[in-house]
Amino acid sequence: MSATDATTKRAEQRAAAVADAMDDIAKINAHGREHGGIDRDGVERIRERLLQLAERDDLFPLEDFPPPAEGRSASMYRIAQNHDDELALYVQSVLDGTAAPPHEHTTWAVIVGMRGQELNRFYDRCAGEGEPQAVREVMVARGTGVAMLGHDLHSIHIEGASTNFHCYGLALERLKGRRFWHADEGEWREYYDVGHIVEARPGYATSPA
Ligand SMILES: [Fe+2]
């Protein structure tokens, strides 16, 4: 098989695996909605389903999801997003370290590791309630993941290169009015940073990494 054939076959297998996972996640999300909104059990089930997808890390090699060139810390490859922008799945590819201050998402969020390490810290309160204190941390790497509800706060600390799944109940560019803790100013501020999103869904024109 030529290198091009192998790349095409991998893309097909990846598209099928992602579609299967997102079908399952859509069912979990819909079930949560019918019961007044997704809860901890629901996001845990999504985390478990994405851990299963991450076992196929051979379908998500670095050559298909390269980190950005110098000057940017990370690229967010959008590999799935449904018709109304709900249920967005990204492959985050980090070049050499990146960080995000304590922030909320205003929708559920799940992060699952494939390569490298992403330290997640969790905090003792919700946005807008004064200075957050870290109470727990989880190192996300291959075989581990974290799940959050909309008001949960976390911060991200990555050293070196990493490749992870980031999945949200609403596409990143649709998340409005979320807040982060600005440590230098000692206040909560609106969080606009959605990172560098790269279109990578099957059938869509790709955008620059
Ligand atoms: Fe986050």
Image: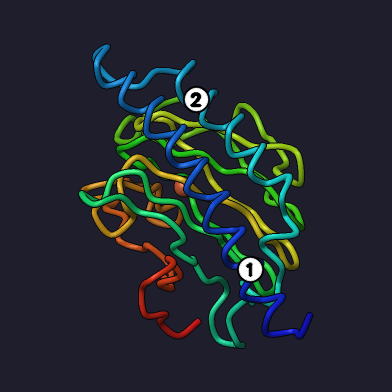
In this picture the colour scheme is: rainbow
Q: Nearer the viewer, residue 158 or 66?
A: 66
Give the residue type at disc 2. Asp
Mark 1 and mark 2 in contact? Answer it, CB < 8 Å.
no
Q: Position of residue 177 (x, y in %)?
A: 21, 48
Q: Position of residue 99 (x, y in %)?
A: 57, 59
Q: Position of residue 128 (x, y in %)?
A: 29, 35
Q: Nearer the viewer, residue 176 or 204?
A: 204
Q: Nearer the viewer, residue 208 or 201?
A: 201
> In whole angstroms, how far apart are the C-alphas of marks 1 and 2?
28 Å
**Residue 169 located left or right of residue 5:** left
Give the residue type at disc 1. Val
* Dot 1: element: strand
Residue hosting label 1: 94
Is 33 located above or below residue 71 in the figure?
A: above
**Residue 180 located left or right of residue 46:** left
Q: Quick check: is the Cβ at mark 1 less than 8 Å away from ligand 1?
A: no
Quadrant position of residue 64: bottom right
**Residue 46 located left or right of residue 32:** right
Q: Image point 68% across, 51% down: which residue?
A: 118
Is 103 located above or below residue 147 in the figure?
A: below
* Dot 2: element: loop
Q: Image point 74% across, 52% down: which residue?
A: 117
Q: Image point 63% across, 54% down: which residue?
A: 164
Sooner in the amino-acid sequence: mark 1 or mark 2: 1
Foreground: disc 1 or disc 2: 1
Q: Position of residue 207 (x, y in %)?
A: 40, 82
Residue hosting label 2: 124
Q: Image point 61% across, 27% down: which residue?
A: 135
* Quadrant the N terminus occupies: bottom right
Is 63 located above or below residue 187 in the figure?
A: below
